[in-house]
Image (tube, rainbow, N blue to C red):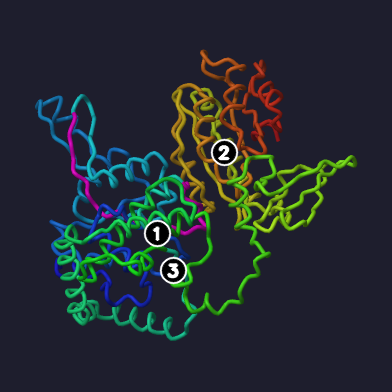
Amino acid sequence: MRQVEEYMNFPFSAIVGQDHFKLALILNLVDPLIGGVLAVGDKGTGKTTLIRSLTSLMGNQENYPFVNLPIGVSEDRLIGSIDLEQLINAKKEVVNLGLMAQAHQGVLYVDEVNLLQDYLTDILLDAAASGNYYLEREGVSRYFESRFCLVGSMNPEEGNLRPQLKDRFGLSVNITTSVDPKVRQKIIKQRFEFDDDPLQFVADYSVEDDRIKSRIEAAKNRLKSIQITDDTIAYCSQLAIQHQVEGLRADILLLKTARAYVAYQNTSNITIKDVDTIADLVLNHRSLNNEPNKENSSPDQNNQPEEKPSEVSPSKEDKVNMLLPQNKFHKPKDIRTNTVQNGTHSIQNSEGNIALIDTKKTVSQYLATDKFELKNKRKNKLLKQHHIFLIDSSGSMLKDQIIAYAKGTVNKIAEASKNQNTQFSIISLFDGEAQHILNRTGVLKAIEIALTALKTGGKTNLTAGFKHVKGICSDIEFNHNLHIITDGKLNTEDSLEATVLAFQTYCKGVQTTQIIDAEKGMVKIGVASDLAHRINANYECLITDNEH
């Protein structure tokens, strides 16, 4: 039975296509310090199958474990916990290993990583980057090594990963569904062969898997002997600057990934061609300049008609606009401006071309291209919608099952707003704290599951909730809509003035705000109503069965 279980994963070398993904995974096995792989792609494209097939390249599972991290994992399960019964009764410090410690020297796989709670993702990525972490529980402090290859997969239709978290993954690949009939037919045939006789199918590919495994082990041994020249470092920095990446992580990873690639290819020096080969893996999710790399473009991309220089795509315009000062027109030094009395500005470049801008319109609606042409930005109505639910689940909301009606209201709003360009997040307020329990998903079932697990009790701290709102409103491609469901019974130390100030401080990225007042009873304090008025929010009352 044990033998059958070991052969249940699809062989790595039998995977058809996905060469970039396979290379990214191999390079992380060669050098785990690269920081893992994020696979973004359509459902049903074989992302999970390929990731699980890594077990055929990792050897003994005791020394090189493959650990799957479930999406609903708790913090104790992730980092470990102390056996309190042993600690109290037997005075023994017994530590239950967390998944990160179990994955040491192996692979830690997170399916639908975009649905993982943000603070758990932070813990996970920090440990993956440093290779270790500390468990601090019940006065006990333990150090654990956690040097593993972190692999995450996600379907962008179910919600995006926060940009700052996406950047922490060393490499990324975009997985698309093959449109080649021959490739699709081969995948189908191999799937049937594997399902009908998995042991024989794995045996047929064992020689090739062993060959790849041997190359990985040899590459690990020669990794530190690879020569790195100043010219290579300069080229990596130049490439990072060209792609307008933020920070220096891309420069370092270009060099690390190229070194691992050269070691795997059994050569000794890093060339410009080697860097170009792996550049897309590092820059896919970091570049603010999305011009394709001509050397690495696919045949389909090369056959596309060349875009005219004056035609700037909306997505590129948005990214250029992010680099300009807000509400200002970006002017190179050789542009001269003259004010005209009728409410327009004239702009003249070095070639003498003149354009007029109507100053009665908001200047931030326009962009300047490198040829000083004016183009309208994409209007807000074309932006995707992000609905953020800030749910008060404090002790006062438990009375008369008001929290149940609040959950029902969230479901109704989500169902009414649902389309392919809509995402939902949920922040819960309980016990004087705020917890981000659902991060940017388009799946209604995920909302139901999150609401079912909603914790209740304690006091209401709206300020803590607003701080979480700030962290998920940085994406300018979305209209962020905030729905606050509360009875207005705040912490005694939080005044209405302080709450209004907190909203103004932390919720600047919110386009529309709605307050749903859950306060019931003959005598009402009316805080929710007053708050709605002070922050200029839409105000509604929560309707229960007794009020229909």
Amino acid of disc 2 = Phe
Instruction: State the image coordinates of residue 506 (x, y, percent, origin top left).
Output: 56, 30
Q: Which residue is mark 3?
A: 44
Element type at marker 2? strand
Q: Earlier in the sequence, mark 2 or mark 3?
A: 3
Instruction: State the image coordinates of residue 198 (x, y, percent, origin top left).
Output: 24, 77
Which of labels 3 and 1 is toward the front?
1
Amino acid of disc 3 = Gly
Q: Residue at x 44, y 24 (%)?
A: 431
Quadrant of the drawing holding the N terminus: bottom left
Report whether residue 261 is seen: yes
The mark found on residue 172 in the picture is 1
Q: Pointers 3 and 1 in contact (CB under 8 A)? A: no
Pick the residue in front: 166 or 533.
166
Q: Earlier in the sequence, mark 3 or mark 1?
A: 3
Q: Residue at x 26, y 52 (%)?
A: 33
Q: Which residues are magenta?
A: 141-163
Pick the residue in front: 447 or 320.
320
Amino acid of disc 1 = Ser
Q: Earlier in the sequence, mark 1 or mark 2?
A: 1
Q: Does residue 206 lie above or below 94 as drawn?
A: below
Q: Which residue is mark 2?
A: 389
